[in-house]
């Protein structure tokens, strides 16, 4: 039979409360990365994706078409 995998020394110390899983420096770096991500993509990493139904997409397309038609009738620029 195969060997049973034992936890590493760090894992044992973390479980015993003698070690931190992440250092303060790593925490600060993680916060900076999260801020950059939110600034760039506008949402938290790991946030659930918002999925639109095809019906709502068709509604948006119809509204856009109607707006373009009205602008054409009034002489506004598109």
Image (cartoon, rainbow, N blue to C red):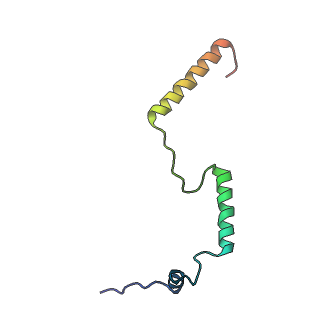
Task: Decide if residue 10 is on the left or right side of residue 72.
Answer: left
Which of these two is toward me, 41 or 77?
41
Position in image of residue 32 (x %, y %): 69, 62
Q: Residue at coordinates 36% horizontally, 87% vertically from top-left?
A: 3
Residue under the point 50% across and 33% down: 57
Q: Residue at x 69, y 14 (%)?
A: 75
User: Is 74 placed above or below 12 here?
Assistant: above
Q: Is residue 11 above or below residue 29?
A: below
Residue 36 in the image: state x and y as whole percent: 68, 57
Quadrant of the image occupied by residue 69: top right
For residue 58, above or below residue 2: above
Which residue occupies the extreme front position in the image?
Answer: 17
**Which image quadrant for residue 18?**
bottom right
At 53% from the left and 29% from the top, the residue drawn is 60
What percent of the width, then of the height, locates residue 13? 54, 85
* Quadrant (top left, top right, bottom left, bottom right) of the C terminus: top right
**Residue 56 image point, x, y percent:** 48, 32
Figure quadrant of the N terminus: bottom left
């Amino acid at each position: 039979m195969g060997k049973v995998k034992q936890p590493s020394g760090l894992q044992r110390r973390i479980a015993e409360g003698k070690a931190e899983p992440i250092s303060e420096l790593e925490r600060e770096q993680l916060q900076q990365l999260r801020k950059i991500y939110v600034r760039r993509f506008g949402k938290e990493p790991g946030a659930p994706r918002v999925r639109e139904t095809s019906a709502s997409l068709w509604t948006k397309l119809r509204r856009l078409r109607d707006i373009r038609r009205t602008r054409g009738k009034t002489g506004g620029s598109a």
